[in-house]
Amino acid sequence: MKILAIETSCDETSAAVVEDGRRVCSDIISSQVDIHRKFGGVVPEIASRHHVEDVLPVVDLALQEAGMTLAETDAVAVTQGPGLVGALLVGVAAAKALSYAAGKPLLAVNHMEGHMYANLVAHPQLVPPFLTLVVSGGHTMLVDIPAYNEFRLLGETKDDAAGEAFDKIARVMGYPYPGGPEIDRLAQQGNPQAIEFPQALRHEHSYDFSFSGVKSAVINYLHHQEQIGAGYSPEDVAASFQAAVVDVLVDKTVRAAQACGRETICLAGGVAANSALRAQLSAAAEPLGMRVLAPSARLCTDNAVMIGARAYYQWQRGDTADWSLNADPRLPFTGGRQG
Ligand code: KG4
Ligand code: ZN
């Protein structure tokens, strides 16, 4: 079963061919990061226009790299949401046209479920059950995956996503978009105990997160230091901020895994590339007999491979879309809230 998958939810135009949800036959990503960097973040209108220009050439490259024609694909999958509406629409329109032209089924994928399923590609032996921590520029959620096609949302952020906080703080410190990797790099040279930033909801029983408080506290600290002419150490700020975020993520993730009786924790989303998060989560989980897995950096950030992987399991249960398919920028997560 070879699925041609398309992802255009934000600023990467990506297409891939994935066989049986696990084997990557091709993987093409055209990133717009350099274009949006000038503006300090993604400009939705510019993203849509670039998707329009790039989507069909990127699909052609993905088919070429897989050594097949459109007629040889078994289905066409696309990210339906969540994401930027104009960006999503380009992918959905392209996928509908391609699936109609080829006479192949159309599969509509939830972007967040795609991030989680990237782990199935990265780890060929991995099978549910496992717990996932999804941390990206737009979302932060803890999701239990008891079986294929089953998702139980345990908790999520009440305000900013973890990646959003990384990006905002890097921007205020004068670093280019996306700021997460910069903070990660700076933090490696800094003291995580240098400045105490708030860790909202850390000791609350729920699995929800809140990162707007730590974000504001860091920004206030930076402004205050400038106002009194004291300056600051970017390394110490990065390390202290990162520790405040990572400690909460690690605490709640390990607690959730224990509560669900899971032995495998999978990271997903762009912030899963963060070195402190990976190291601290492993250090906390391994002594408890749990293992921590994460996809490669390429599979952590937005890509079509994960969409093709997720789509395969939808296809197995006959969950195909029809021609009325529309992009949904706020596509709800199918797992629902489980407390
Ligand atoms: O999953 P993703 O590519 O896009 C969304 O769906 O949001 O995630 C992008 C986010 C950005 O906020 C970026 O700064 C962050 O992932 N990120 C990192 C690291 N690498 C990427 N954050 C912290 N540490 C990193 N090493
Ligand atoms: Zn994403």
Image (cartoon, grey):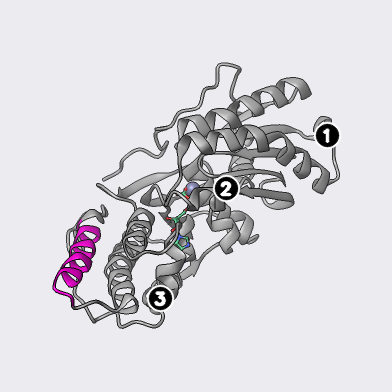
- What residue lies at 60% left-to-right and 37% top-to-bottom? 50
Secondary structure under tag 2 reads: loop
Q: Earlier in the sequence, mark 3 or mark 2?
A: 2
Report the span colored magenta.
Answer: 213-229
Q: Earlier in the sequence, mark 2 or mark 1?
A: 2
Q: Is mark 1 within 8 Å of ligand 2?
A: no
Residue 263 in sight here: no
Q: Is mark 2 within 8 Å of ligand 1?
A: no
Secondary structure under tag 3 reads: helix
Q: Which residue is mark 2?
A: 32
Q: Which residue is mark 1?
A: 72
- Residue type beneath disc 1: Glu
Report the Cα–Cα distance between label 3 and label 2: 24 Å
- Residue type beneath disc 2: Gln
- Residue type beneath disc 3: Leu
Report the Cα–Cα distance between label 1 and label 3: 47 Å
Q: Which residue is mark 3?
A: 186
Closest to the observer, 335 or 91: 91
